Amino acid sequence: MRLLSLLLLTSIVYAADYRAGVARIKITPEQRIWLSGYANRTKPAEGTLSDLYAKALAIEDKKGKRVVIITTDLIGLPRVMTDLISARLQKEHRLERSQILFNSSHTHTGPVIRANLMTMYSLPPEQDKLLADYSRDLAGKLFTTAAAALGQLKPASLRQTQGTAKFAINRRQAAATGVRIGLNPQGPVDHSVPVLEVLSEDGRPLAILFGYACHNTTLTGEHYLYSGDYAGFAQTELETIYPGATAMFLMLCGGDANPNPRTKEEHARAHGKELAAAVKTALDGKPTRVRGELRSAFQTIRLNFRPHTREDFENEAKSTNTYAVKRAKEMLAAYDAGNAVRSTPYPIHAIRFGKDMTILALGGEVVVDYALRAKREHPKERLVVAGYSNDVMCYIPSLRVLKEGGYEADSSMIYYGMPGPFAEDVEESIMSSVTAVLKRVGVK
Ligand SMILES: [Zn+2]
């Protein structure tokens, strides 16, 4: 009798509510490619500290609806690439755009990805071909990995939980000259570590998807080895703790958060360990079952920039800042072509698992205010708010951050080749569309 009830209990815990498949592929460049994220680097990568991966998790509900989540140890996948891969997945695997989610960890010790942050670098000419070859190869690898995950669907159950890690700190420090990148212990931050665990039929973890809202910038511009930074170390650590499982990092709204402390390899390893421990502690607690049908919605809106004129860029072209001159020339060329850049496309994406969990995935380097606001506005929903998803076109400041100014609001736009700060309706434009997209997946 006891054995029977134990068996019943086991079958309840591990009832296969879904089918799931995982796949991974190494994407560490074989060549010495320029590392992305810092403007001050003077030479390409010199080797590998830890390998970079793309990983895919495919999930199918009982009605046959599928989603595939693709995570990458990369600075930021641009829309040109995710569009290309999505189109192929849509055609060859009969998916809709809303069933495919791309996320970038924003590691600053990964390769430059075309055309993300292209104004940031003055690359030696031999890098052009290396970057083009790498990007082309990467697009093929991401498709293959997603297809492999979709091709290996097996009965699975899902559980979700949440932990806490404390190493993220708000980096927008007030100074006499305005906001600069530093440490702001009083500034808003999101220390939550959401976890989605995928268990195979025998109860073993198949995949562990976990997120954190913090730049992967422990390793600063003096580092010249490929690595996934803290997120890379956290994934490796989790795959050691849970043999056979694929650990996948989802970058959340960490646009204005840095790891603290930073600069040394040992710091990145320690943050990785802390994050992995947070995931394990959460899973050792009482994760709750996730079940029910999958729903997904995807919308692209346009975000307006603050109005500008040709004269603004004619003046900027005379600047002593070489990056600003480069941006000015690009903007003047756009004016010449009758195509002045007034707005940018912006993707808003949601995937809901029954009533048990929703991933809201926003494009760009989203500051934490968006995650805090979305969670505040939907207190009953288990909401995971990811940034750096589907496209990384620039920083996405809240109205508060936009008004305060500083790197995330203003100067970063130069490196991203954007005309200037967003107009003041940026936060309301995004949040009203977030409400609409969430409504389409059943979140009231
Ligand atoms: Zn960034």
Image (cartoon, rainbow, N blue to C red):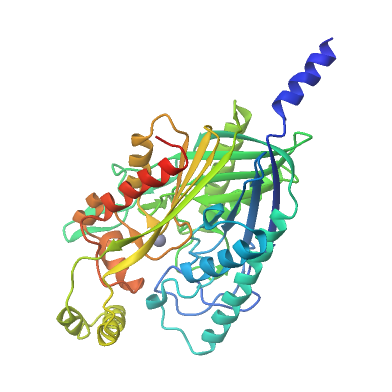
* Closer to us: 397 or 298: 298
Quadrant containing the C terminus is top left
Residue shown at the point (34%, 49%) measured from the top left: 433
Residue 332, x across and y down, in percent: 25, 84
Place residue 38 in its image quadrant. bottom left
Question: Image point 45% across, 75% down: which residue?
Answer: 115
Residue furthest out toward the bottom: 125
- Ligand 1: give its quadrant: bottom left
* Residue 126 % position (x, y): 54, 89
Residue at (80, 20) in percent of width and height: 7
Image coords of residue 301 (percent x, y) = 35, 59
Estimate the x, y position of residue 391 in percent, counting from the top left.
45, 62
Q: Nearer the viewer, residue 413 or 339?
A: 339
Q: Is residue 149 left or right of residue 43?
A: right
The vertical placement of 316 against 284, above or below, is: below
Residue 373 at least partly seen: yes
Residue 226 visible in the displayed image: no
**Left or right of residue 150: residue 138:** left
**Residue 225 appears left or right of 390:** right
Tally the numbered discs. Answer: 0
Q: Quadrant of residue 130?
A: bottom right
Which quarter of the rendering shows the N terminus? top right
Q: Residue at x 48, y 87 (%)?
A: 124
Residue nearest the viewer, comparing 135 with 109:
135
